[in-house]
Image: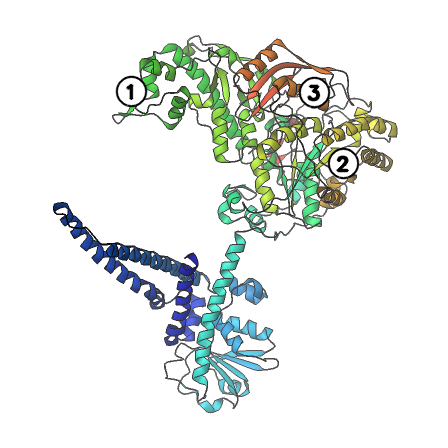
Amino acid sequence: MCYLCLSFPLAGLILFHRSHFGVLSPGAMSNLPQSGELPVHAALMLLVPTLRPLFWSLLRLSICLTGMWDDAIEGFTSTRRVCSWDELLFMLQALLRIYIYITQGLFLFFLIAIFFHCRLSDVNLGRLVRGDAYDCLVSPTACAVLELLEDLDGKTVLLVGADGALGASLHCLLQRRGATTASCQWKSRELQNKLHHADVVVVGSTKPDDVPESWIKPGTTIINCSRDLLSGKHNYGQQNNHDTENAVCSLAVAMRMQNMVKNTERWIQSQQFRKWDLRCLKLQPLSPVPSDIEISRAQSPKAVDVLAKEIGLLTDEIEIYGQTKAKVRLSLLERLKDQPDGKYVLVAGITPTPLGEGKSTVTIGLVQALTAHLNINSFACLRQPSQGPTFGVKGGAAGGGYAQVIPMEEFNLHLTGDIHAITAANNLLAAAIDARILHEGTQSDKALYNRLVPVVNGVRGFSPIQFARLRRLGINKTDPGTLTEEEINKFVRLDIDPSTITWQRVVDTNDRFLRKITVGQANTEKGFVRQAQFDIAVASEIMAILALTNSLEDMKERLGKMVVANDKKGEPVTAEDLGTPVFVHAGPFANIAHGNSSVLADKIALKLVGEKGFVVTEAGFGADIGMEKFFNIKCRASGLVPSVVVLVATVRALKMHGGGPNVTAGAPLKKEYTEENLQLVADGCCNLQKQIQITQLFGVPVVVALNVFKTDSPAEVDLVCEIAKRSGAFDAVPCNHWSDGGRGAVKLAQAVEKAANQKNSFKYLYSLELPIVEKIRIIAQKVYGAQDIELSPAAQSQIDRYTRQGFGNLPICMAKTHLSISHQPERKGVPTGFILPISDVRASIGAGFIYPLVGTMSTMPGLPTRPCFYDIDLDPVTEQVKGLF
């Protein structure tokens, strides 16, 4: 039925053109591309075949229904039968006809709309003149003329009165067919001479009576495209003129249909995945390499809307922030839901020095090499930088050298403001918790109920969030006036135990003096004083939820599940109970959160790159922290499996693990790090070997990327690569992307491409059904190399509580120092035989994990003696930030 409904109007449209465009001239048809409008009478005539039977069916049905209605009225007062089966069948047939005719009408309107769109616009004409004939829609009348002309090589074609888009199109198309073209008007002085020498004359306007037939040499082919070709007023004396005119007319209709099909195919292709039309910016590295900020400002970034179009994003799928940033709408996932995912690559690293070993730089350099040098669609998915480390020790997270995100100021400072939105949402919830404790302590049940469920315009009603709380309490009532006093008490009293509040305020700044604070000291808080603390914003559970969510619905559900405290009966109190609205991409820390970029960003990128493309994402710090959490937490949440792991190492970090002096941020490197020392490198490769072994626990191939510094000797580089290969790495490649951009990471890209085609036997480290303690122990022993774990009484109490509350089947997110595989930052290399102390255990129920705090781990970093912001200033003349990395 669907096929018939679609084919009937199309056949009707073709028949209509055959029977009705005979009374229209090709000139009218040639007007269409120029004006872009279908004649109104033609559009109405298109609908006549559909509207006429639709009208008669509606009339017949109304008569039938009127008679049935009269019979039905009479049936109430008599025993007469209401209607016969024949009448009922007739009514159903009439309804079916109406459905078919309405479907035809809608389809015809769709075709007419496409006709309006298939015009020779300025853009199409420009492409045609430029030579992109295959990338534009050509005037149907011009195409019809060329269809009628066969061999044009060496012939002279004269265009008389053919102006505008038609004339320009004919000039371009005829010249490409080998013809010599000329043009003039009917009043031109050279008309007689040009007509006498022309082999083909294409007429685009009405011939005046004072132009005699004798001016045209015998045997000349004349094609009439004027508006009055069928008026009979002008006849050139050609015997087959009328047939030629009809041919132009019919062919113009056919060519317009061809344009319609071509345009529809383009639209369909735009809705599907296609190979990127990406034009990479030229990169000319300088030596010596300038500062990161100088490199960023020397390169003019491409406008984000242009970039979006080149990689296949539709206009309505992006929300632009300025000239260089945009957010991608989730509707893209629905459009490309049937598109196979690309290859998924994780970049991890060895245990780093306090300076960092360049994972972000490797990530960006690898993607530059894949895209610009190997011509493979590829994306980098990074975390949003936190203001804390940006102004603290580590600096920004935009990469460095000629492998960085530009403009780096915008990337490192605020970006689209998501971290600030998370901070606001987090602190709103914290404020709501303390305010609720205050109000419950100073008001009766009735007063609380009247304020929580107020009368608005004489009506009292529950909000959607309050309905969710009622369902949790088992109260199946919708009218606020029907609740009993006991039910009102249960509804208004969260009865939060202040000593169990786990939800802390956050700020995106390293501020050690907020690690322990007292709130509620003002007289207005009426003595409700308690100890609290600040965490850094990127450690907020909301940040983790944002990074792990798969959809808006999933995010809303996770936010509502967040446990903020327990009541005095030991039951969990959630954000949903408080009714706090929170909505906020993502940049969680790896040492105190799960440390990976957004699941949604990865999923969108995997669809955009196509089946043969690559998406490269980064896990924070060493493989023992960020990679482990990526596999056990993020992969469980997303359902995605990486194809290969890139493990970043540096000679500098390996020397430190081999017994070299401490590396301190802001202090010059000791000579051991600037001179060749093969023994230190060999001894430190134990850490690299351990991280390779950790990767192999998950069954994913690993490629070692040695981030080369200018102080590294060729012998040191060769030694590291050799040891890495002997230790089980698929390949080990030195990279110079910092100084050379993507060109310096081509070998790494080729190794990653080969490794991604290897057999992947991915597996999780532990089962979620194991007890919490056992899952912690597996991570401690298999990943960190600990002998066992030691739980503090507080940690054991929390584990018992979470297990009792039904949260025992969540994955584990260890909060541990990133400067050592163990819990002691000063222990380098591969520590063994130690007991891993668990001082506390917290839960991020909304995000979906339990996070034990190892040793004295703090969730609020502090500033160093000389922070990075000492070097940052604003130039009031240029209005640019100075000293930013």
Image point (55%, 17%), residue name: 802
| Residue receiving disc 2 | 704
Q: Where is residue 319 in the image (x, y as percent from the top left)?
A: 50, 42
Q: How far apart are marks 1 and 2 (CA)?
A: 67 Å
State left or right for residue 236 relative to residue 596.
Answer: left
| Residue receiving disc 3 | 780
Q: Distance between the residues labelled 3 and 2?
A: 24 Å
Is tag 3's residue or tag 2's residue first in the polypeptide sequence? 2
Q: Where is residue 259 in the image (x, y as percent from the top left)?
A: 49, 65
Residue farthest top in this picture:
527
Q: Does residue 878 appear anywhere in the picture?
A: no
Q: Where is residue 249 in the image (x, y as percent from the top left)?
A: 44, 75
How packed is label 1: few (under 14 Cα within 10 Å), some, or many (20 or more)? few
Is tag 1's residue or tag 3's residue first in the polypeptide sequence? 1
| Residue receiving disc 1 | 482
Residue farthest left in this picture:
77
